Amino acid sequence: MHAIDTNVLVRLLVRDDARQAIAAETYVAKGAWVSTLVLAETLWVLDAVYQRSPAQIANAVALMLHHKDFTLQDADVVALALTQFRARPSLGFSDCLVLEIARKAGHLPLGTFDRNLGKLDGAHRL
């Protein structure tokens, strides 16, 4: 299975360059592995560059979790982060993902200065 980077995943999601979108589709047709770092970067791009709403970002994550051609690294962690993000979209998906990665690794509490993140189970506001 091939891995893909952020710009390939962004092209697949936003389809703002037809030639690159077709090339990306062809590349992932036999399956593509998406690392959590690529996922986080992609969602940052969707937010910062393409100004997608939290609901649109959540939908993009759900689409990737259930896409027939994608295998997400630690999909169980991504799904838990998605649940957290949908409950508190003001956090940002990457905050939810960091917390769930720490939880899976057994390294809680997660220390943070973020007031909202600090309210979640498993986080500790410093």
Image (cartoon, helix red, strand yellow):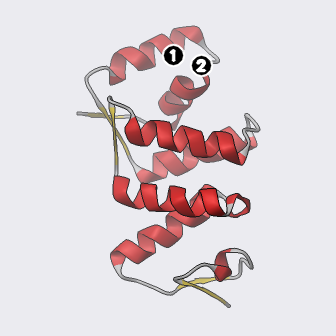
Amino acid marked by disc 1: Ala
Q: Earlier in the sequence, mark 2 or mark 1?
A: 2
Q: Residue at x 32, y 30 (%)?
A: 68
Observer-nearest of 2 and 105 = 105
Image position, residue 79 (x, y; %) = 44, 55
| Residue hosting label 1 | 21
Query: Which residue sits at x=51%, y=37%?
Result: 6
User: Which residue is nearer to you in this view: 110 or 8?
Assistant: 110
Check if mark 2's residue and mark 1's residue have beta carbons within 8 Å. Answer: yes
Residue 45 percent across, percent down from the top left:
65, 41
Q: Is residue 109 left or right of residue 105?
A: right
- Residue on which disc 2 sits: 15
Question: Is residue 74 in view from this perspective?
Answer: no
* 84 and 123: which is toward the camera: 84
Q: CA distance from mark 2 to mark 1?
A: 6 Å
Mark 2 lies on a secondary structure that is: loop
Q: Dot 1 surroundings within 10 Å: few (below 14), some, or many (20 or more)? A: some
Furthest-top residue in view? 19
Residue 31 is at least partly visible in this image = yes
Q: What secondary structure is marked by label 1?
A: helix
The amino acid type of the residue labelled 2 equals Arg
